[in-house]
Amino acid sequence: MKMLYLLLLIFITLISFTSNSFAYLDPGTGSIILQAILGFVAASIATITLYWNKLKNFFKKLLSKKDKKPDDF
């Protein structure tokens, strides 16, 4: 219990002594973030499509073997 109280006291002390940061984000930063998000979405869709087609082809082959009769060979 004493350790938890000490950690809470340290956390409150560190939070109370924060200072402002004067950071600058130029206008190109927004477009870079947008490009990263759109690239992630495009790559995700391409990956899902690739594996979906592989799964469909697997089941097509599996079902086509099942539907064939022994006389068809």
Image (spheres, rainbow, N blue to C red):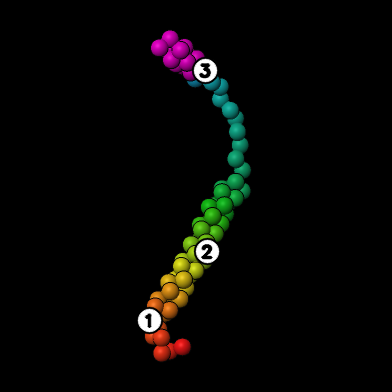
Q: Earlier in the sequence, mark 3 or mark 1?
A: 3
Which amino acid type is marked by label 2? Ala
Number of the label disc, if any, that sits on residue 25: none
The residue stretch that appears in magenta: 1-14
Compute the Cα span from label 3 to label 1: 70 Å
Marks 3, 2: nearer the viewer: 2
Q: Earlier in the sequence, mark 1 or mark 2?
A: 2
Compute the Cα span from label 1 to label 2: 31 Å
Residue 33, magenta (yes or no):
no
- Residue at the image point whose x is 53% and y is 52% from the top: 37
Instruction: Single out the residue that lies furthest toward the top.
Output: 2
- Residue at the image point whose x is 60% and y is 33% from the top: 23
- Residue at the image point whose x is 60% and y is 40% from the top: 25
Residue 70 rendering spot, x and y as whole percentages: 41, 86
SS type, badge 1: helix
Which amino acid type is marked by label 3? Leu
Compute the Cα span from label 3 to label 2: 45 Å
Number of the label disc, if any, that sits on residue 67: 1
Viewer-nearest residue: 60 or 38: 60
Measured along the vertical axis of the image, is residue 66 above or below residue 71? Answer: above
- Residue designated by label 2: 46
Looking at the figure, which quarter contains the N terminus? top left
